[in-house]
Amino acid sequence: MIRERRSREKLENYYRKYTEEGVLDPNTHPWVAESWKRSRARGIANETMPPAVRLSKEELADRRKTHQDAIGYLDGLYNEVSEYFNSYNLSLFILDNECYSLKNYAMPFFQRTPGEVEGMRLSERDIGTSSISIAYEHKTTFLMFGPEMWVRDCQDGDACSTPVVVDGELKYILTLVSVDQDVLPYNAIVSLLLSMKYALEKHLSMQWHLKARDAILDAAPFAVYHIVPGGSVVYTNKLGRSRLAKISEDTEGDDLPNLSSVVLNYRHTPLFKGFKGIPSYNKEVTWITANKTYEDITTVVPLERDQDNIINSVVAVTMPIEDLRTLVAHAVGYKARYNLNSMVGQAPSFVSMQEKAGRVARNNNNVLLQGEPGTGKERLAHGIHQGSSRAAGPLISVMCGAHTPELLEVELFGTAEGTDESRPGKLELANGGTLFFDEIEKMPAKVAAKLTGVLTSGISSRVGENIKRNIDVRVISACDSDLKRLTDKGVFRNDLYELLSKSVIRIPPLRARREDIPLLASHIIGEVAEQHQLKNKNVAAEAAELLMHYDWPGNIKQLQGVVEHAFFNTIGDTIKSTNISLLADAPVGNAWKEDKEVFVKAWQAAGGNISRLANMLDVSRVTLYRYLKKYGLSKE
């Protein structure tokens, strides 16, 4: 609050009347009157400066370091107007938001040396009423005359305090004090203080916003550069700085290299075109340096056209293609959904397999998983990836039997789509991670030959391109049959088999671990209940017995279909044997009457038991005997 000059004699009378008689004159400023009341209630001595809370030298040094942005900027402001301070015997000091004096400028405040004031807490609870306490409480600028201050020792000087507020939060208080009231131009003094407040607020706001910007850009998965003509980099984020350090080993300290000097093909990059006013968006760019060749997705935006239509600078945003592939792979769900603990069992054959998978996961060998269909090879591949040092990278799956040789080659290696554009294949997307081949035995010979070369050399090219790219993947392959036997017969490439089978894990069929079936059923039910946010269910003993006595030609995958069907078709909390249909995963309808293969599958599902099969197909035993004879099957 900016106030008119007041009569010191009247103000002294108001103060004496209150401190000696306890009577408040109605002409006393209401904010001052309220503060006087609180000062008296706190028992603060008003004759001499009371002992104040003080920071130690170490604590003060730490606070100054914390607030160096504000202090450093205020130092510069003060240097510009120091002669004005000396002319009017002014003192300036800055307090933090706890009212600790951080630094004093010019004449000693309260006739004390700077060393005595700095580090003191000057809040209302310490020294009573002052311009500091009024500005702090009411969050506004306040000019206070000497006789209004609570401590008599301080009444020789007038003071004006103003809060420094950044983003709605009080950060500091600036205070000007003078002892030459007669010659003091109050309007000029207050204007000076408000100018310093405004400048400091703008500076701090900009600094904090810049720090937030830097934090955001440093956390971003791309490099950002601000470049001026000639190729000099005037700003870059953390990733950009690290890349520049690798490009130019001669760079010292905070110096950034000149890109026109270190990028050998600089004149053929979008940067050079950017200074001609030509922007580039998401272009694949090759950067050739003396140390390494980089491939990035790059955007260049020209900035700041001057009056002569000349570009003064450009901003470049680049992302290494390898990082982009990993980012995309994660974004589309190319990551492990299971860990090794998601596979349950207690049978010795399973425990041995699981322990070996844990050991294999920790090395970087390619892995071959062998087992009948439905034994859980894909889940095991996820678990091995999750337990490996590549867990943070992508896990990419390829179904070798799902495409023609031509389509599989494109899917795996990528392809050129035009003169300037191409897209990566799954081999590149898996860089830094794991590539999982399902049904590897069905891989076409042409694709297998090319894959062998890539895995041997670590270098790949997209279909229709000559650009060579480094490949760093771990390969996990799954085979439903004996891949070694197929290799010995010449059906599968021997050199590729040797590359893929550095570690071999054989997964036992479910019929070889029947004791695990109740545990697996309970685990499947738990996963389904959690996935659909439903209440868990139990498996009755007779139902578990039924499941254990079936051979499960489809292994765990078939068991999962049967158990899920029972879960959703059971009313109540317990799944009984009557709730279980062993053909639940593949209902046959009436097709068994015409199709021997379907009938045989149903016959196997019933375990060769006529009564069970009759219940499953809802026909009489006599009818079944007729079809057994028709298909040439024995009831034995």
Image: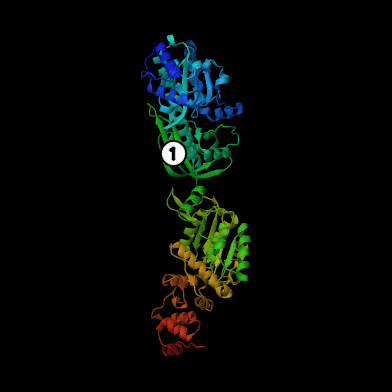
Amino acid tagged 1: Val
Nearer-the-camera pick, 422 or 64: 64
Q: Secondary structure at mark 1?
A: strand
Residue 58 as seen in the image, left or right of residue 601: right
Where residue 571 appears, x then y in whole percent?
41, 72
Q: For mark 1, does the 10 Å Cα neighbourhood hold few (<14), some (14 to 19), or many (20 or more) residues?
A: many
Where residue 618 appears, x then y in whole percent?
40, 83
Nearer-the-camera pick, 418 or 342: 342
Q: Is residue 145 visible to us here?
A: no
Residue at the image position 63 percent from the left and 64 percent from the top: 356
Which quadrant, please, contains the N terminus? Answer: top left
Where residue 619 appears, x then y in whole percent?
40, 85
- 322, above or below 114, in the image: below
Nearer-the-camera pick, 242 or 115: 115
Give the labeled residue for mark 1. Answer: 300
Residue at the image position 43 percent from the left and 81 percent from the top: 616
